[in-house]
Image (cartoon, rainbow, N blue to C red):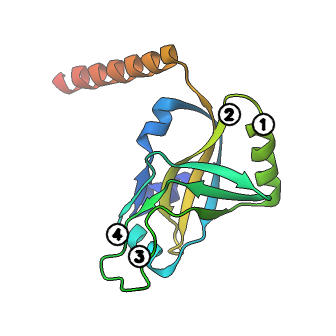
Amino acid sequence: MNKDDELLRKKSPISIKNKKASFEYFFVDTYTAGIVLTGTEIKSIRMGKASLVDAYCYIVNGEIWVKGMNVSPYFYGSYSNHEAKRDRKLLLKKREIHQLQEATKQVGFTIVPILVFIDNKGRAKIDIALAKGKKEYDKRQTLKEKEDRREMDRAMKHY
């Protein structure tokens, strides 16, 4: 990710994060993918009505899909409203999909969605990461670091 991409994510009006993922996994590599959506799904995402809790990605026939991503039905939608937890296709280059497929063959690696955002052209994008699961002691270390950062912030506010 370069600085322009980071700036784009910060400027995005919508930023739906998977907070649990950074606690559960070490991120080895990240990719930005497009999402294939229906009309009412993009409207719900623009309203911030989506969740990445318990979502993961899988590869079938050279295509990458996200499973478990919840996009709430659009309030003003009618009979054409979408299903909330359907599998959604992601758009990546074949080379990137192949790299991910080879990496996930190793034990302990998986693909998790990290962030859904709207780019400057109004399209929904998703950041996914090749991730390795943390052990219990790694999670305790992460919690300890988080507590230490909080303590340091509190100490700095008192001065």
- Vertical order, 92 against 76 (above or below): above
Tell me where residue 74 sits by quadrant: bottom left
Which numbered mark, 1 or 3, is in the foreground of this view? 1
Q: Are marks 2 and 1 in contact (CB under 8 Å)?
A: yes
Label 2 amino acid? Phe
Label 3 amino acid? Lys
SS of the residue at dot 1? loop
Q: Are marks 1 and 4 in contact (CB under 8 Å)?
A: no
What residue would you read off at disc 1?
A: 105
What residue would you read off at disc 2?
A: 109
Q: From where the camera sits, is residue 21 visible?
A: yes
Name the residue furthest left.
158
Label 2 packing within 10 angstroms: few (<14), some (14-19), many (20+): some
Q: CA distance from mark 3 to mark 4?
A: 6 Å
SS of the residue at dot 3? helix
Q: Residue at x 25, y 23 (%)?
A: 156
Q: From where the camera sits, is residue 4 visible?
A: no
Name the residue furthest top.
137
What residue would you read off at disc 4?
A: 47
Q: Are marks 3 and 4 in contact (CB under 8 Å)?
A: yes
Q: Position of residue 6 (x, y in %)?
A: 53, 52
SS of the residue at dot 2? strand
Label 4 packing within 10 angstroms: few (<14), some (14-19), many (20+): few
Q: Position of residue 108 (x, y in %)?
A: 67, 29
What residue would you read off at disc 3?
A: 43
Left or right: residue 95 versus residue 40 is right
Left or right: residue 123 versus residue 155 is right
- Is 144 in front, or is 65? 65
Label 4 amino acid? Met
Q: Position of residue 16 (x, y in %)?
A: 42, 55
Q: First in sequence: mark 2 or mark 4?
A: 4
